[in-house]
Image: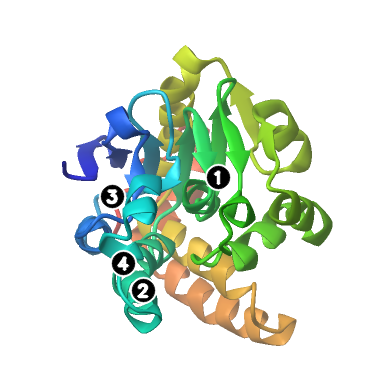
Amino acid sequence: MSLLDTHFADHVTTLTLNRPDSMNPLGAAGDGDAFVEACDAINADMDVRCVILTGSGRAFSAGGDIKAMKEKTGNFGGTAPEIADGYRNNIHKLLRALYSLRVPLVAAVNGPAIGLGCDLACLADMRIASDKAKFGVTFLKLGIIPGDGGTWILPRIIGEARAAELFYTGDVIDAATALDWGLVSRVVEQNALIGEAQALAAKVAAMPPHALRQAKNLMRQGRSTSYDAALEMAANAQALMHSTRDHMEGVDALLEKRAPQFTGE
């Protein structure tokens, strides 16, 4: 079954993991290519201003396919070099595509997000959880390590100590704990999740598209650059924004006490 279901409306693209019968596992052949295709199309379309990522059924994603691990098939079969290439050419391709989205990404975590599924959610800029959501990075319980960059991204979100606790114990935390730890920004009832995510995405999508993408890029670059370099990048990006029609629309709207209508010009 195809991994992704894609829907676009009102400047927002919704990507839904679509293997509900098996809790939306990741890593089947072609999964990386599916994400690359979807994310490349989003990046190339200035009409897209925000993305929602969610899961179908009762799970966000249970992570890697345990059955394939047991049977040593797909990404989990072959020699050690072949398995490493399987990660690079499929799972890592999926993650790199999502990380490379130029527009803000909202993860609407509808249920368990475990292992690779948790790390996938962590690539989002904003995370909203349903009260049924659970989070865990349970790799060590399977005798493996986080093979998807989770040790890089999770400490940046919840801090080294709490990330270490999750990685080294394999514990699974509930939505309330995830909120307390800063892993998600809000928890809502299950039946309200998509509506909340859509409302948040609509606020994001109301912003000027060029400035929105520049703001995300500056936040991303700020993770690995000096303050002086960040200021220089901001000056150059700001100069470009001052020359746009959307900037003048924002100024006029503020002075005229009305909502701005940004067009991407």
Position of residue 65 relative to residue 80, above or below, is above
- Callout 4: SS: loop
**Badge 2 vs badge 4, beta-carbon distance below 8 Å:** yes
Of label 4 and label 1, which has the lower sequence position? 4
Q: CA distance from mark 3 to mark 1?
A: 17 Å
**Mark 3 or mark 1: which is in front?**
1
**Which residue ends up furthest to the left in the rendered image?**
1
Q: Amino acid at mark 4?
A: Gly
Q: Amino acid at mark 1?
A: Met
The reply, left or right, for residue 209 in relation to residue 13 is: right
**Along the viewing direction, whichever of 50 and 95 lies nearer the viewer:** 95
Residue at image mark 2? 83
Residue at image mark 1? 126
Of label 1 and label 2, which has the lower sequence position? 2
Position of residue 46 relative to residue 96, above or below, is above
- Image coordinates for residue 163, horizontal then vertical, percent: 73, 55
Residue at image mark 3? 48
Residue at image mark 4? 77
- Callout 3: SS: loop
Q: Amino acid at mark 3?
A: Val
- Image coordinates for residue 110, horizontal then vertical, percent: 47, 28
- Callout 1: SS: strand
Asked if one can make out residue 255 in the rendered structure from this viewpoint, the answer is: no
At horizontal 37% and vertical 70% (from top left) the residue drawn is: 87
**Along the viewing direction, whichever of 92 and 108 lies nearer the viewer:** 92
At horizontal 56% and vertical 53% (from top left) the residue drawn is: 142
The answer to which quarter of the image holds residue 60 is: top left
Crowding at dot 1, Cα within 10 Å, few <14 / some 14-19 / many 20+, comes out as many
